[in-house]
Image (cartoon, helix red, strand yellow):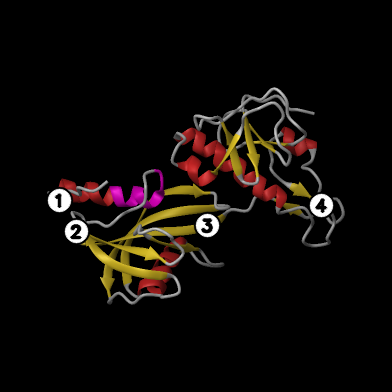
Amino acid sequence: MQPNFSKLWLVKNGSIGVDSSGNPIHEVESLREGIYLPLTASDSNDYALLLKDDLVNSDVQWVSLRECLFEFNEQQILSASQAVQLSHWFYSHRFCSCCGTALGLPHAEDLKRKEMVLRCNACDSNYYPRVSPCIIVLIKKEKSCLLARHKRSHTAVYTTLAGFIEAGESAEQAVIREVREEVGIEVNNLTFHSSQSWPFPGQLMLGFYADYADGEISLQEEEIVDANWFESTNLPEIPPSGTIARRLIDGFLERCKSQGEEYSGV
């Protein structure tokens, strides 16, 4: 049974359904059976429609969420991201990890109140969408900032340092530990900047600024290819707009600009 919805977000294999112009498709005349899950990250009545089969009588194209992040507006990104995260949650929780019972679909009463949970009818275990907290930090040293090229990246982009928060650790402790592990220096004067959902597959990035305190750069070679101090007027290739890393860098550049230094890059 199809619920009443304002918009559908079509999801298949972690990709979003768009038209030939790259715009999200919210309505199609004929669909095969799918899983309808309400989106809760906004006040809308949008639903994700999780599909395994092809659409019927439609010209849907499937694009990765990373492509969507740089083409959609902010509200579209929020909805598309949650739709993909719900898809990952649903298909990665098909059985109870405590007793092995098949979980099936969310209960109708939970969907009605938009509570995203899969309940085990055998042992009463509950499974909510997993969100993994991470820190991301831009380290400042006068009018320079520390940027690194990560080993897992296939581009020449230099970006900020980031890492997962470990069990029992505060976000601030994670910043200090990750910086020490990845580049071997000490930082202080941590200030929170902003956060961003990063749905690959379910991180919440907590963005910080930190000041350089002590030490020389020493790379964690299994993670970092290169790291260096870059003056605000001479930055390498940096992350694109829409990412929290770029947001942190842009904030640093604005501060430098107000002090008479200006970045001339993209």
Helix, strand or loop status at disc 1: loop
Q: CA distance from mark 4 to mark 1?
A: 58 Å
Q: CA distance from mark 2 to mark 4?
A: 55 Å
Q: Between label 1 and label 3, give the one nearer the viewer.
A: 1
Relative vertical location of residue 104 with respect to residue 97 in this rendering, above or below: above
Give the residue number, with chain letter if any, for mark 3.
133
Q: Is residue 60 left or right of residue 173?
A: right
Residue closest to the eye, 102 or 33 = 33
Tell me the amino acid under the disc marked 3.
Pro
Q: CA distance from mark 3 to mark 2?
A: 29 Å
Snapshot quadrant of residue 207: bottom left
Tell me the amino acid under the disc marked 2.
Lys
Q: In the drawing, what numbered circle is on residue 261?
A: 1
The image position of residue 228, as x and y in percent, is 28, 67
| Of pointers 2 and 4, the one earlier in the residue sequence | 4
Give the residue number, with chain letter if any, for mark 4.
120
Q: CA distance from mark 4 to mark 3?
A: 26 Å
Q: Is residue 66 left or right of residue 259?
A: right
Relative vertical location of residue 55 with respect to residue 234 in this rendering, above or below: above
Tell me the amino acid under the disc marked 4.
Cys
| Cβ atoms under marks 1 and 2 closer than 8 Å | yes
Segment colored magenta? 242-250
Q: Between label 2 and label 4, give the one nearer the viewer.
A: 2
| Of pointers 1 and 2, the one earlier in the residue sequence | 2
Tell me the amino acid under the disc marked 1.
Glu
Q: Main secondary structure of the magenta part?
A: helix
| Cβ atoms under marks 4 and 3 closer than 8 Å | no
Q: Between label 4 and label 1, give the one nearer the viewer.
A: 1
The image position of residue 124, as x and y in percent, is 82, 53
Give the residue number, with chain letter if any, for mark 2.
143
